[in-house]
Image (tube, rainbow, N blue to C red):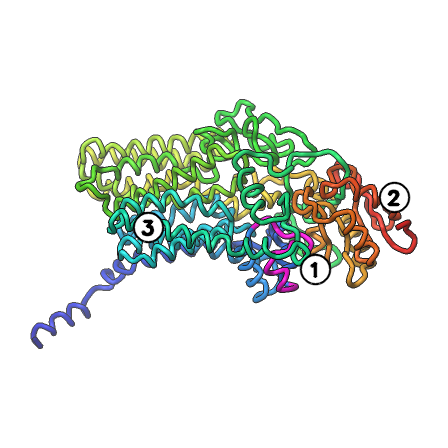
């Protein structure tokens, strides 16, 4: 035994450095991808300021009291809550409690979640399909532009995706081990995801159900019972916080923002549910009436921040908005573009992409080819065509009656891609950065399919050997055409990279078919990858290097490099891009006259007062919530607050309804004193006029 042990030790000791390096190479490559992902997600994050001012204001309010924290109050006074569930905002608030109230502290959780999700794609793929498949899936995910956009914003989509990928890990373990607890953990994680972005988390339920029912080793009766138990756990975790809020008396919590009856239940299935599918968005496109409005100072382009006024608030972000509020119908974006969407720079009010687009958002025309339209393709669709070829490469007739777990994992990603892609193809309303939900499905299919496609090409497996050349031809060809027609400046830069790399890959494939050589096949595969990923990488870089003026509806694209306003700007943002000083003077005036225990000011929409909360932390409130249509303040309650001295200053505009009640406006105009605009250095808000009123000793009421 001693004689046998010596050679083994010597063999281990005498292994060359190259061998050890090759063993560690996949891990090093994964670390490199994760680092690349984090750099894309976090580099230059300070230029984004505080991101979406709506959420930034909520985070500041939430850190002022545990009551505001639990109920995710938008304002420090606890009047109206944010129109999202709590977990993602809780995470951001906890980061702020640790690192201080900084924009980067709120954006850091999303950047970390994006990088961690790229690692999870490797973990979920490499175990069954090998390290090359895992690395491919990880890289494809990290370079998806919508992933980078969402990772650089204080919306919570990347936190959701990370939680859903962890749920998938538990799901795969449930089939491998046969333990029900792993399935229950999967259900709990999806329920946690529900408390990050509500029904968006349920988009993966079809893939979860299909995978478990077809691949589990349990008898069908036990599978069905396990699924029923999992649904119970899913519902319990999903609606625990909802029940806690709705069971709390309305007087003891904020009004549920963007709901019609002050319940989380209605918010889930109304504003954040059916209205996303059918349109409407709770009055987003409605207009008329009179109301409060002023807008916020942070409408400036985040890429041109030159420091805050009076030494405060450096790197303020672009203002969030809720689209066109004056009832103007969407413009017809079918202006001759080969993709049916609006050509960059023809933005108008930010509409486009065909008839019936959601207001202020260029999401193209609903239909089966929506994801290939001009405004959409660059966000997440670069590998949609290659993904279809990858599916063809992996489809083999099962040898037995049951799917193997390996085949089930492929089916899981296919169903994920089909379900999410189907929703985004036909839904009436969403923002383009939501397309990050496509990334796991595309990355999973691509990670599994690309190595298999290369293997079939190298081994000359019948008709399947032609999938790799055809994938290059159609995938790279469409990407090159898109770049050529989308943006003229790219014809001399990005287009040649895609076209030349694709042509060289095809040439090497032809050479390999004539005289098979391993090096030729792998070189062709490398050039193919460069050609297919070049556009996606470039679009991702634009999200990192440049700042979209509209941080409420961010997207990636080369036009972000221009100084001109980008499509999607709201009226308030456009007005305050060049009108920062007037808003600052109003804020200074309100702070100077603020009385402890009162509201700093009352406005209509969250967009009107969010910047004041971000800057000062004082209780500026929005009587109508995010959209300006909430009935958070009744006339009786408003009068009571005036009498108690809590309401002193009110902003009234000529457009929009004040929390859905013109009675409030009439009461203000009849009983408060109009403040001369010269006192606060303003009086206009873009297309609408704003008047500041004051209640007090010299007022009528």
Which numbered marker is on residue 225? 3
Dot placed on the residue nearer the N-terminal end, 2 or 1: 1
Locate residue 654 relative to residue 401 in the image: left or right: right
Magenta segment's dominant SS is loop
**How far across and how far down the image is residue 434, in percent?**
50, 43
Give the spatial CA distance, label 3 vs label 2.
64 Å
> Which mark is first along the chain, 3 or 1?
3
Residue named by callout 2 = 670
First to last magenta residue range: 64-84
Nearer to us of marks 2 and 1 is: 2
* Residue 40 visible to the viewer: no
**Residue 6 lies in what quarter of the image?**
bottom left
Q: Is residue 340 visible?
A: yes
Q: Is residue 66 magenta?
A: yes
Eyeballing the image, is 221 above or below 287? below
* Image height of 635 relative to 500, above or below: below
Residue 699, image x, y percentages: 90, 51
528 falls in the magenta region: no
**Residue on which the image places disc 1:** 617
Report crowding for label 3: few under 14, some 14 to 19, many 20 or more residues within 10 A (C-alpha): few
Q: Nearer the viewer, mark 1 or mark 3?
A: 3
């Amino acid at each position: 035994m001693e004689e046998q042990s010596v050679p083994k030790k010597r063999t281990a000791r005498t292994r060359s450095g190259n061998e050890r390096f090759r063993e560690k190479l996949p891990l090093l490559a994964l670390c490199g991808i994760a680092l690349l992902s984090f750099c894309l997600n976090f580099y230059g994050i300070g230029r984004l300021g505080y991101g979406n001012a709506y959420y930034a204001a909520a985070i500041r309010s939430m850190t002022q009291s545990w009551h505001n924290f639990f109920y995710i109050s938008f304002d420090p006074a606890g009047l109206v809550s944010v129109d999202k569930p709590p977990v993602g905002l809780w995470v951001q608030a906890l980061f702020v409690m640790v690192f201080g109230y900084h924009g980067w502290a709120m954006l850091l959780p999303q950047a970390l979640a994006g990088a961690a999700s790229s690692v999870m794609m490797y973990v979920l793929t490499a175990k069954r399909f090998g390290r090359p498949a895992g690395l491919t899936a990880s890289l494809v995910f990290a370079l998806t532009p919508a992933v980078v956009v969402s990772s650089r914003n204080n919306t919570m989509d990347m936190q959701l995706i990370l939680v859903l990928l962890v749920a998938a890990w538990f799901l795969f373990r449930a089939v491998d081990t046969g333990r029900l607890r792993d399935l229950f953990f999967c259900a709990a994680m999806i329920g946690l995801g529900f408390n990050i972005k509500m029904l968006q988390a349920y988009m993966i339920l079809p893939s979860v159900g299909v995978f478990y029912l077809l691949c589990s080793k349990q008898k069908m009766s036990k599978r069905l019972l396990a699924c029923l138990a999992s649904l119970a756990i899913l519902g319990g975790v999903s609606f625990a916080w909802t029940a806690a809020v709705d069971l709390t008396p309305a007087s003891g919590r904020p009004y549920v923002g963007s709901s019609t009856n002050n319940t989380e239940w209605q918010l889930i299935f109304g504003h954040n549910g059916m209205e996303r599918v059918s349109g409407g968005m709770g009055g987003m496109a409605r207009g008329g009436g009179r109301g409060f409005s002023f807008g916020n100072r942070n409408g400036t382009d985040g890429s041109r921040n030159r420091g805050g006024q009076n030494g405060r608030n450096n790197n303020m972000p672009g203002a969030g908005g809720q689209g066109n509020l004056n009832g103007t119908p969407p413009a017809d974006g079918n202006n001759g573009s080969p993709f049916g969407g609006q050509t960059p720079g023809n933005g108008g009010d930010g509409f486009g992409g065909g008839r019936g687009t959601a207001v202020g958002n260029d999401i193209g025309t609903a239909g089966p080819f929506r994801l290939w339209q001009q405004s959409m393709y660059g966000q997440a669709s670069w590998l949609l065509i290659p993904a279809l070829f990858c599916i063809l490469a992996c489809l083999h007739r099962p040898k037995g009656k049951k799917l193997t777990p390996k085949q089930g994992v492929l089916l899981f990603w296919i169903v994920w891609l089909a379900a999410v892609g189907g929703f985004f193809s036909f839904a009436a309303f969403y923002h383009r950065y939501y397309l990050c939900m496509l990334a796991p499905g595309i990355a999973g299919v691509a990670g599994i399919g690309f190595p298999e496609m290369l293997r079939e090409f190298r081994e000359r497996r019948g008709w399947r050997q032609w999938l790799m050349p055809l994938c290059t031809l159609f995938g790279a060809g469409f990407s090159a055409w898109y770049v050529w027609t989308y943006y003229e400046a790219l014809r001399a830069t990005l287009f040649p990279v895609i076209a030349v790399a694709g042509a060289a890959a095809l040439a090497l494939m032809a050479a390999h078919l004539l005289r098979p050589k391993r090096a030729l096949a792998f070189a062709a595969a490398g050039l193919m990858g460069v050609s297919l990923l070049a556009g996606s990488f470039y679009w991702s870089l634009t999200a990192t290097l440049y700042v979209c003026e509209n941080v409420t509806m961010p997207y990636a694209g080369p036009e972000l490099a221009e100084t001109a306003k980008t499509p999607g700007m709201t009226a308030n943002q456009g007005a305050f891009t060049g009108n920062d000083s007037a808003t600052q003077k109003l804020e200074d005036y309100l702070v100077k006259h603020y009385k402890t225990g009162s509201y700093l000011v009352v406005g209509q929409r969250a967009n009107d007062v969010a910047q004041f909360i971000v800057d000062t932390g004082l209780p500026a409130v929005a009587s109508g919530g995010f959209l300006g249509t909430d009935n958070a303040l009744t006339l009786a309650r408003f009068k009571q607050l005036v009498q108690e001295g809590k309401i002193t200053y009110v902003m009234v505009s000529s457009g929009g309804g004040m929390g859905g009640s013109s009675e409030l406006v009439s009461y203000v105009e009849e009983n408060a004193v109009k403040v001369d605009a010269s006192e606060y250095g303003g009086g206009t808000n873009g297309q609408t006029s704003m008047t500041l009123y004051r209640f007090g000793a010299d007022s009528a009421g």
